[in-house]
Image (cartoon, rainbow, N blue to C red):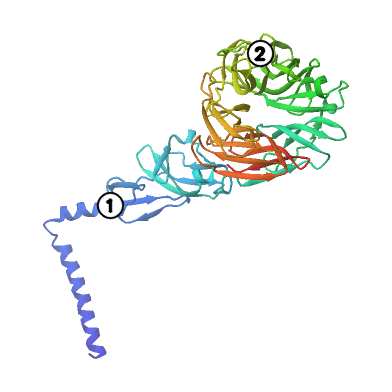
Amino acid sequence: MSRSTFVLPLATAACFAQTLADGADRFPHETDSEAGSSAATSTGTSTTTGEPWQTVTGSTWPSTTAVVTGSSTSEGPAAEPPEIFKFTVEPDTLHEAGTAVAHVDVSADVVSLQLHVDGQEVWAGPPSEFTWTFAATSKAASEGTYTLELVASDSEGLTASATAMLWVTLPDTGTERCVFTEDVGAGRLTAAVYSEDALVVAGALANPSYEATVWRLDPDSCQPQAGYPRQLSQWSPQPMPATSEAVGLALDADGRMAIAANLGAGLSRQPYLAVLSPEGALEWEYLGPMGQTYSGVTAAPNRFVVVGEVHVNINEEQETPTYDGLVESFDAAGTKVWSRILAAPLPGDSFTDNTNDLAEHPRAVKWQEESQTLLLVGERRVTEDIVLEWTRAFSARYTANGALVGAWTSSGLDGDEDGLLAVATCNRNPLAAGWVSSGPNSSTTATRWLDPLGNGDKRRIDNLADASMRAVACDREQKISAVATTDTDAYVVGFKSSDDPFLFNHLFPQATLAAVDCDSRGFCAAAGLLGNHAWVRVHHP
């Protein structure tokens, strides 16, 4: 086809279109009312994704899209949907246990918000009340990628949506987070408690003499906070024996530190209790008589309670000293409110101890908020006939006013002898730890779940040869962390329940571990000594 023949059809088409338009103006179509209704009705969608502008799309509407419907000729412009100016989660990546917080900024016409995480609604309400926090705990429970979608609605039902992402990548449970070693002088730690802003540990430090000492460590780096460590001679104005060691630690609701210690050596030791402010200043102290010792302390409402033992006499057959248990309560100002001797027979005993040849050794005490009682655990000598004597685990419960309301003593089902050395609260229930033995040099660790009456028949026996479990604690997920010690080595272990395998089991040669505690995020600290230095290891939940 020539160029001229190609132009002609185009010109003809143009003329035809003009002629058709002129005809339409002169001769209106009979169905003009139908064509006018179709032209006056329009639909559109507006969606905001966190940016301060809007885009108009076609008729494919996402589920969170704001939809506006109306006549363009009779109802004016389409209604504007609400806006989401900001929707973020900060931080957007978590590499260890902690929290991420959602932040929202929306237009004034928004009346309600909905937040979905991976398609599930987790929050709904007015913008003024919006708050949402993601708590990452352990790798097994929290690791993953999370998609957050926010839907904002106005009073006319129009909506806008925005999305944000959260990435959680955590270390394995039991992985080391930080370590503290006191390099100045020989020493060891016997107690550990987390406060809101510190990991508080106590024990003794030979600098220059072996003296009761407290440290406050940064909970994230394990480094000592300013002004610590502090030793007994630094906070007490009184002259004290040259040798002393802290054996228990408790913090009250105000962050005050109660340090139970023993001063002196051998049968000449004296029990000592000091209460320091969170800044380390002495508020009050108490020094008990010779022949008594403390082994643990707990904070109860408006008071501190200590347990220990009092020397009674010498067992002539065994040529060893015998002891009765000791429980004492002090009010917030340091006044001793009551003191009790714990001795056989206890509730449930089928024997007496008229000559006081048997011994009771309370090792730890814990205030139980649920039952409003004091629960102490320990070891005691019992007799089954005139000849046989055994060491048994036991627990005893007291009211806040010092009334003995119950006791439990092991029946020896798990071995020839057993004992309890520590107690904690796990999922609002008491949990105790200690040992069982079926013969000479055959001890192993035991964990006991105590019922409301103190009965510890539900237990977990682990094959950690020649070891005793010295301390136990629960993290945020109610996983259990415990420390166990042999004559030469120490273990840090974790597990979920009485029947599960270890989540982790770490052996530390030339170490002795005596304390463990967990913070609100789930980090747990094991404390004791490594070699001859005070030592702390914090692990991930």
Pick whichever, 32 or 94, lies toward us: 94
Image coordinates for residue 129, horizontal then vertical, percent: 48, 33
Q: Nearer the viewer, residue 301 or 18?
A: 301
- The image quarter containing residue 398 is top right
In the displayed structure, 421 sits above or below 100; it is above
Task: Give the vertical position of 378 relative to 179 (above or below).
Answer: above
Residue on which the image places disc 1: 42
- In the picture of the structure, the residue carrying the numbered disc 2 is 343
Task: Write the residue at 78% across / 19% down.
Answer: 285
What quarter of the picture does the C terminus occupy? top right
Residue 84 - label: none
All told, the count of numbered labels is 2
**386, above or below 430, in the image:** above
Please name the amino acid that badge 2 sits on. Ala
Under circle 2, the secondary element is loop
**Which circle's residue, 2 or 1, is located before the other in the chain?**
1
Query: Where's residue 354, x and y in %?
Result: 67, 8
Question: Which residue occupies the extreme top position in the image?
Answer: 354
On screen, residue 215 above or below 106: above
Classify residue 155 as left or right of residue 30: right
Alpha-carbon span between mark 2 and mark 1:
90 Å
